[in-house]
Image (cartoon, rainbow, N blue to C red):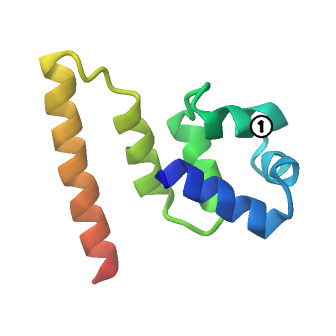
Amino acid sequence: MSQLNYLIEKGKSMFGSYGALADAIGVPNTHISMWKSGRRYCSPPDRAALASAVDEDPTAATIEAVIEGIDLKSPQGKRATHALQVALHNLQTSLKS
């Protein structure tokens, strides 16, 4: 399960429905289903709001969203993705300590 879908499912469990989750983070209800299906990109600010609403780390969620939004076809995108993955790994390691 992707990090985004994990956050959405946790939010549904906590708030009782996708609609209540959407209301809690201030997005239209349709965004939740579109995020789940991959038809809409979940922006870094929305991912941070979602993570915060379900008591998860918004920084890690934001980095995940940025990584997902990078064009992997370009050399710069590949380098940026690698650098962000290293940063995310380091962040997650430091949070476990």
Q: Nearer the viewer, residue 73 or 89?
A: 73
Q: Residues within 10 Å of mark 1 (few under 14, many from 20)?
A: some
The residue drawn where x is 79% and y is 42% is 26
Among the 4 quarters of the image, the one containing residue 47: top right
Can residue 28 be seen in this snapshot? no
54 sits left or right of 30 in the view = left
Q: Is residue 79 above or below residue 76?
A: below
Q: Give the total number of marks visible in the rendering.
A: 1
The residue drawn where x is 63% and y is 50% is 49
Where is residue 84 shown, x and y percent of the image? 24, 44
Q: Is residue 95 above or below residue 45?
A: below
The residue drawn where x is 72% and y is 40% is 32
Where is residue 27 shown, x and y percent of the image? 77, 37
79 sits left or right of 5 in the view = left
Local SS, label 1: loop
Q: Residue furthest bottom?
A: 97
Where is residue 33 shown, x and y percent of the image? 73, 37
Where is residue 10 shown, x and y percent of the image? 66, 64
33 sits left or right of 80 in the view = right
Can residue 61 be seen in this snapshot? yes
Q: Which residue is mark 1?
A: 27
Among the 4 quarters of the image, the one containing residue 76: top left
Residue type, mark 1 in image? Val
Q: Residue furthest top?
A: 74
Q: Nearer the viewer, residue 35 or 45?
A: 35
Image quarter of the C terminus: bottom left
Q: Is residue 96 above or below residue 3?
A: below
